[in-house]
Amino acid sequence: MLICRIAPLEEHYNIDLKMENIINGEIISSVSRVVDQNIIDIINSMPPMIIDLISQQYPDSKIENKVPNVPIRSRKIKENINSNSKSTVKIEKGPIQNIVSDEKSLIVITESTNISLNNDVYSDLELFNEVFDYPYWVIKASYLSPENNLLIAGLKDGTICLWNTNEWGSPYQYNFYNKSISAISVSKSILSVSYIDGKIDFIDINSLELQYRKTISNNEIKFIFPIDGGFIFISSYSSISMFNIKEKQILLNLSNYNNKLRSASISSDNKLLALGYTDGKIKLYRVGSSMNPTLINGNWEKPYIRFQQSFQVDNSIISIDFSASDDLIACLQEDGRVEFLDILNNNIYNKLNLDTQNDDKNIIKFIDDYAFIIGSINGNLYHHELK
């Protein structure tokens, strides 16, 4: 039996874990630790303590001490964030359009249709291999679908390009509409492609045949995020819509009239949506991650969109991104500074002045919970880490 005792100790907590034989009450193994007086540090202390208990029970066994990191930050994050750049990588193939990653690799896409791949980013960020280059196309949107082994790009002339990420080479090309593409996403077997006039194509990802076309908004759809059974669409005026693929219609719509929207990001569980604005405001919304009613604590919960809270930073937002565990949002501002929103503790940390070429087309992307990259208009990648 595992017994856990947590007791206050001045401004800290003392955590005692012990493994007890339920038959005779014998203590088989035990471990103690003192942590700061907050739930975050308690959570972070548990995995290594449990491994210690198991090691005491089985001293002759080789237990790999690779504890899955719980990257919830301590309350000292403000002092621990630093602005030291680990490296700068020069892609030099035009402005960085997007940085996407899966478990295996990091892919950098430029607006002038250069695609570079790094399969070992944690060992050497500079080991990029160019897998495609055709500077006569202009990429306006891109999306990586690891489950389908596809990188999908939407061009200014309305062409959709699809690369098999296992093989690369030349892409498959399709053109269903002659307007510039503004956003792309995939939900299960459906590819959603939006155009600057508010129309959206829904394409079967397997047959690559157009299934139907919908006019979702009178304004441009700037961002698309996949959820179970559908998509979240965000217009240039910040209206948020949830689209049901099966029923082929908008299920929910939260109307907004703010044309200062600049960037958007969604958490890894698709439940928290962040919108960043040119006036320095970041708005957070809770969203239902499925288009189907879900049984939660004995109650059927229907899909929803709910405003949660907002943050205010000093300058215009140009790019935002969630950390891998969704506890931080990195906010890149027009003046080149980066601030971090601590969602759990409702704080804003540090204005990092990073050595990058400032431009309103720069983007920021977390690689994991600590490393992040800024992609610049000059084609450079600036790699930084939180400590």
Image: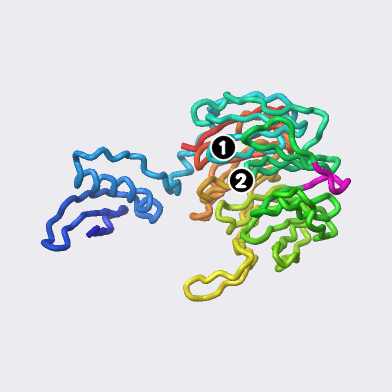
Q: Say what secondary structure mark 1 lies in.
A: strand
Residue situated furthest right in the rendering = 178
Q: Residue at coordinates 32% horizontally, 39% vertically from top-left? A: 65
Q: What amino acid type is highlighted by mark number 1? A: Phe
Q: How many marks?
A: 2
Give the residue displayed 80% in from the left and 35% down from the top. 138
Residue sticking out furthest to the bottom: 299
Where in the figure is residue 157, as x and y percent of width and height?
A: 86, 41
Q: Secondary structure at mark 2?
A: strand
For the residues bearing labels 2 and 1, Cβ distance under 8 angstroms: yes
Q: How far is disc 2 from disc 1 in space, using C-alphas?
A: 9 Å
Residue 306 location in percent, x, y? 63, 66
Residue labelled with disc 2: 321
Vertical position of residue 70 compared to residue 91: above or below: below
**Drawn side of residue 258 relative to residue 129, left or right:** right
Q: Is residue 330 left or right of residue 369?
A: right
Please give the range of residues in magenta: 174-182
Quadrant of the rendered structure where residue 92 is?
top right
Q: Mark 1: few, some, or many residues within 10 Å (few <14, many ≥20)?
A: many
Residue at x-position 61% and y-position 32%: 354
**Could you tell which of marks 2 and 1 lies nearer the N-terminus?**
2
- Determine the residue positioned at 52% across, 25% down: 124
**Amino acid type assigned to the residue bearing label 2 in the image:** Asp
Q: Which mark is residue 372?
A: 1
Question: Mark 2 packing: few (<14 Cα in 10 Å), some, or many (20+)?
Answer: many
Is 13 magenta? The answer is no
Residue 344 place in picture, x, y as percent = 49, 55
Q: Is residue 13 visible?
A: yes
Given residues 253 and 333, the one toward you in this image is 253
Asked if one can make out residue 281 in the rendered structure from this viewpoint, the answer is no
Describe residue 77's horizontal placement relative to residue 367 as left or right: left
Q: Is residue 175 part of the magenta span, yes or no?
A: yes
